[in-house]
Image: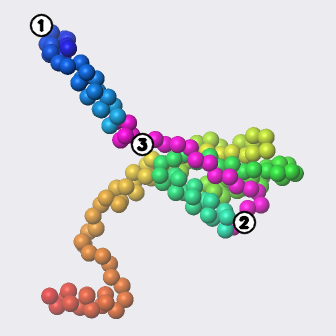
Amino acid sequence: MEVAPTANPPVCRIMDYGKFKFDEAQRAKESRRKSQGTGIKEMKYRPKIGPGDFDTKTRMVQKFLEEGHKVKITIMFRGREVFHPELGKKILDRVAETIGDGAKIEADARLDGRNMTMVLAPDRRVRQRTKEADAAPSTNGSQPQSGAGAETAAAAAEGA
């Protein structure tokens, strides 16, 4: 097998081709295992959704975004609801506002037949900041204390 074809004279190595192919396959398998696949998740809402259901579904959207998935939000219209797309747009805007800067709108609200869709993607900069904040050690090295125990701990620290 040729190791350095540009060298003068070219450098070659005698090796077992089966072993070479096996090692190559193992490296490829390892790199696939380390790469994180980002899928697209979908969350469906209705125009007449209640506040509890809205909060639950929006929390799940937030969780999907934190895991690194894109989220397709669908508003399903039934019957004459389709004549009031502003209700669906209002819900999509509320979802985007609730999630805040944790996501960016990849595809804006669009009416497709009886469904209105919007795609949210995780904001990489926000994820990086939260990872850095989690990795940074605390400055004083101890947990903050509260209640009566905090006063005695502070007094003991002053006395020491």
Question: Please, is residue 138 above or below residue 70 in the view?
Answer: below
Residue 146 in view (yes/no): yes
Under circle 3, the secondary element is loop
- What mark, if any, has residue 36 been given in the picture? 3
Task: Give the label, 3 or 2, closer to the camera.
Answer: 3
Q: CA distance from mark 1 to mark 2?
A: 76 Å
Q: Amino acid at mark 2?
A: Gly
Q: Amino acid at mark 1?
A: Pro
Query: Could you say which quadrant of the image residue 9 lies in?
Result: top left
Residue 125 x %, y %: 43, 49
Q: CA distance from mark 3 to mark 1?
A: 42 Å
Q: CA distance from mark 3 to mark 2?
A: 35 Å
Under circle 2, the secondary element is loop
Q: Report the residue marked by disc 1.
A: 9
1 or 2: tag closer to the N-terminus: 1
Residue 112 x %, y %: 75, 40
3 or 2: tag closer to the N-terminus: 3
The answer to whether the residues at label 3 and label 1 have Cβ atoms under 8 Å apart is no
Looking at the rendering, the stretch of residues picked out in magenta corresponds to 31-51
**The C terminus appears in which quarter of the rendering?**
bottom left
- What mark, if any, has residue 82 been given in the picture? none
Residue 128 x %, y %: 39, 51
Residue 120 in view (yes/no): no
